[in-house]
Image (cartoon, grey):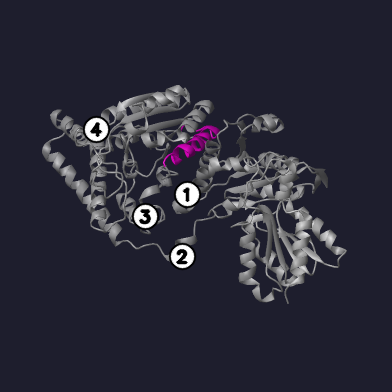
């Protein structure tokens, strides 16, 4: 039996630092892409509170499955920015030796496993992870991050239904970021909330303001406590917005300007900064110092990735079969 | 030696492996219902029914395999695997490589296939070659009760995802199975009949059609060797080549359609590695590029029958050097 030690909440300040790291990292990544120095990637700019908030509620033995928009989840879980950036660049020093690239980075040692870039792929795998935890009588849970786009896949229904019937310890985190690649959610679904869909399948759920990191962390803690106590799945919908395009580069010409500016005014980082400054938890000098620390970390990651070697050609056919 | 059906042989293999290794579990559509003896012995946690949803069955198997279990899933009929292609091909087949070797996917997916039950093209479709083209997965298709058992045991013990195709036409024909822990290695062909004039290379039920044809050809003074591939991936290249190098003639036979089928791969292998020993061009006898019909005579006509195979052999012997 595995004992789960919940990660101690080290205040919103740390959540802010995590969000700043994600934002700076992804913007740097996009900048390198635009300069022709990095392959393309999908950013989660605007959605940082979801990653930072949910991760704070998970224990070190909990397992995490994510998707193509994963840098935030990885960094919030404590992944080394150098190795994430190197993986995005397809370098041998990356977490997957450069074989993943940006789209399906897994870091088993951190419990970030089986990342799939097939939208909904992670939903089909998480039930198996939940089944393993159940069979092993572990206290740990599996958390799966997916978007509203994945929720429109049939596998969402299959996954949540099976998790309900088999009572699997799974936290479904639907990051409803309003965009499904290049299509707005309102074009593809009539409902506004994925949380309603899981209820229909018998899985308790809740929608939370996905741009308020404190609210996300609190809701995630409750959800995790529910799963640990009842050994049943739960769906947490973090209602948020993808502030950048689907995949770099993306001029977002297809995005409604009013909608974009409305969500920009609700930037999760600005919300957290204002709150911390207003409450006197953080001074503007401390905030500036934090930003500088993060900037240096990200610059170092970029340098590390750029300087790292590509994998050898003998890696072309290794790791195919066990 | 026991005389049992291949269907029973698969179940026996599964039961023995479940006794041997507590990580082995089995689930699928009606698994606990139909395999009630297994459910009784191993309990509802290890023998489960699932919704009629192949995608989540296969995905659950992949996720469970990567985190410590060894699932054996029953996807019923091969065409149903089209609902599980994402999970089997993109997840189980690729995530080991993609992750730089962080995960393994020791799982077995069982699917019935081929003519024999007159169930029509959405239950009967030999798609085994689709998976041969998928990196990271292994593919087996046995022809004897003993191999059904022995290959199933190997498949369950393998660290990779194994697609286990069970030819419907063979499932209920009893055959001899050795006692004890009978294990047949994956990747090893079997020589079913020795001969000197021509090699018939096949797998699944058409192995038996080849043996029938070989029997007929004896009266004509033709000595036919029959190689049963058993494992389609990895392919036993040495096993195929040693026979063809001896006879100098090869006819590849399978029920699946010809284009890009296993036969095409075998023919290419022979052309690449045994060309200078060939006395005649390699030919294939396969199913047509058409969905198999339900109507029994049409269904049987889809399958390479002994007379068609024998005719191909005669043509082989008529040409060449």
User: Is residue B9 toward the left or the right of residue B256 in the image?
Assistant: right
User: Is residue A287 toward the left or the right of residue A197 in the image?
Assistant: left
* Separation (CA) of disc 1 from disc 2: 18 Å
* Separation (CA) of disc 4 from disc 3: 30 Å
Which mark is in front, 4 or 2?
2
Chain that bears disc 4: A
User: Callout 1: few (<14), some (14-19), or many (20+) C-alpha neighbours within 10 Å?
Assistant: many
Labelled disc at residue A314: 2
Looking at the picture, do discs 4 and 2 lie on one chain? yes
**CB of mark 1 within 8 Å of CB of mark 2?**
no
Residue at the (17%, 30%) spot, across then down: A275
Which mark is in front, 4 or 1?
1
Looking at the picture, do discs 4 and 3 lie on one chain? yes
* Separation (CA) of disc 4 from disc 1: 35 Å
**CB of mark 2 within 8 Å of CB of mark 3?**
no
Q: Quadrant of residue A136?
A: top right
User: Callout 3: few (<14), some (14-19), or many (20+) C-alpha neighbours within 10 Å?
Assistant: many
Labelled disc at residue A94: 3
**Pointer 1 residue:** B95
* Separation (CA) of disc 1 from disc 3: 16 Å
Q: Which is more toward the observer, A141 or B93?
A: B93
User: Callout 2: few (<14), some (14-19), or many (20+) C-alpha neighbours within 10 Å?
Assistant: few
Q: Which residues are magenta?
A: A119-140
Kind of element beneath mark 2: helix
């Amino acid at each position: 039996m595995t004992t789960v030690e919940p990660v101690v909440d080290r205040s919103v300040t740390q959540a802010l630092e995590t969000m700043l790291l994600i934002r700076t990292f992804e913007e740097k990544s996009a900048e390198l892409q635009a300069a022709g120095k990095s392959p393309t990637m999908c950013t989660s700019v605007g959605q940082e509170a979801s990653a930072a908030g949910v991760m704070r509620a998970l224990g070190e033995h909990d397992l995490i499955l994510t998707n193509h928009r994963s840098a935030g989840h990885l960094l919030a879980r404590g992944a080394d920015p150098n190795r994430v950036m190197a993986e995005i660049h397809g370098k041998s020093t990356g977490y997957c030796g450069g074989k993943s690239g940006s789209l399906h980075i897994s870091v088993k040692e951190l419990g970030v496993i089986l990342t799939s870039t097939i939208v909904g792929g992670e939903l089909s795998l998480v039930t198996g992870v939940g089944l393993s935890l159940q069979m092993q009588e572990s206290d740990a849970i599996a958390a799966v991050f997916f978007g509203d786009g994945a929720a429109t896949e049939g596998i969402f229904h299959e996954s949540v239904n099976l998790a309900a019937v088999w009572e699997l310890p799974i936290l479904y985190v639907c990051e409803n970021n309003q965009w499904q690649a290049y299509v707005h959610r309102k074009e593809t679904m009539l409902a506004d909330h994925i949380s309603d869909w899981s209820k229909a399948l018998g899985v308790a759920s809740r929608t939370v303001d996905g741009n308020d990191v404190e609210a996300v962390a609190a809701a995630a803690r409750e959800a995790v406590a529910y799963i640990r106590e009842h050994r049943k799945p739960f769906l947490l919908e973090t209602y948020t917005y993808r502030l950048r395009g689907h995949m770099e580069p993306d001029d977002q010409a297809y995005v409604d300007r009013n909608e974009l500016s409305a969500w920009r005014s609700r930037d999760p980082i600005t919300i957290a900064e204002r709150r911390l400054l207003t409450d006197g938890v953080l001074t503007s000098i401390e905030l500036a110092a934090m930003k500088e620390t993060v900037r240096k970390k990200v610059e170092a990651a970029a340098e590390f990735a750029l300087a790292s070697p590509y994998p050898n050609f003998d890696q072309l056919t290794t790791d195919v079969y066990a | 030696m026991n005389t049992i059906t291949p269907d029973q042989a698969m179940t026996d293999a599964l039961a023995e492996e479940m006794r041997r290794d507590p990580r082995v579990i089995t689930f699928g559509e009606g698994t606990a219902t139909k395999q009630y003896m297994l459910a009784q012995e191993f309990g509802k946690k290890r023998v489960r029914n699932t919704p009629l949803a192949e995608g989540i069955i296969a995905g659950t198997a992949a996720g469970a395999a990567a985190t410590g279990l060894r699932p054996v899933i029953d996807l019923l009929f091969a065409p149903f695997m089209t609902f599980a292609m994402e999970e089997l091909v993109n997840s189980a087949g690729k995530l080991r490589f993609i992750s730089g070797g962080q995960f393994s996917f020791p799982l077995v997916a069982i699917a019935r296939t081929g003519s024999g039950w007159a169930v029509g093209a959405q239950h009967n479709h030999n798609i085994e070659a689709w998976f041969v083209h998928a990196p990271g997965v292994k593919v087996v298709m046995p022809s004897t009760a003993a191999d059904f058992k022995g290959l199933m045991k190997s498949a369950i013990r393998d660290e990779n995802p194994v697609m286990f195709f069970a030819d419907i036409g063979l499932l209920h024909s009893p055959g001899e199975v050795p006692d004890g822990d009978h294990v047949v290695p994956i990747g090893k062909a079997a020589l079913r009949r020795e001969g000197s004039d021509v090699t018939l290379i096949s797998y699944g039920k058409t192995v038996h059609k080849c043996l029938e044809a070989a029997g007929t050809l004896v009266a004509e003074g033709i000595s036919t060797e029959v190689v049963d591939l058993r494992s389609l991936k990895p392919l036993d290249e040495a096993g195929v080549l040693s026979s063809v190098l001896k006879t100098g003639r090869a006819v590849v036979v399978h029920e699946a359609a010809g284009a890009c089928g296993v036969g095409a791969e075998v023919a290419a292998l022979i052309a690449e590695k045994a060309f200078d020993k060939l006395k005649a061009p390699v030919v294939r006898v396969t199913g047509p590029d058409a969905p198999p019909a339900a109507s029994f005579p049409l269904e049987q006509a889809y399958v390479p029958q002994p007379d068609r195979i024998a005719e191909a052999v005669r043509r082989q012997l008529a040409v060449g050097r």
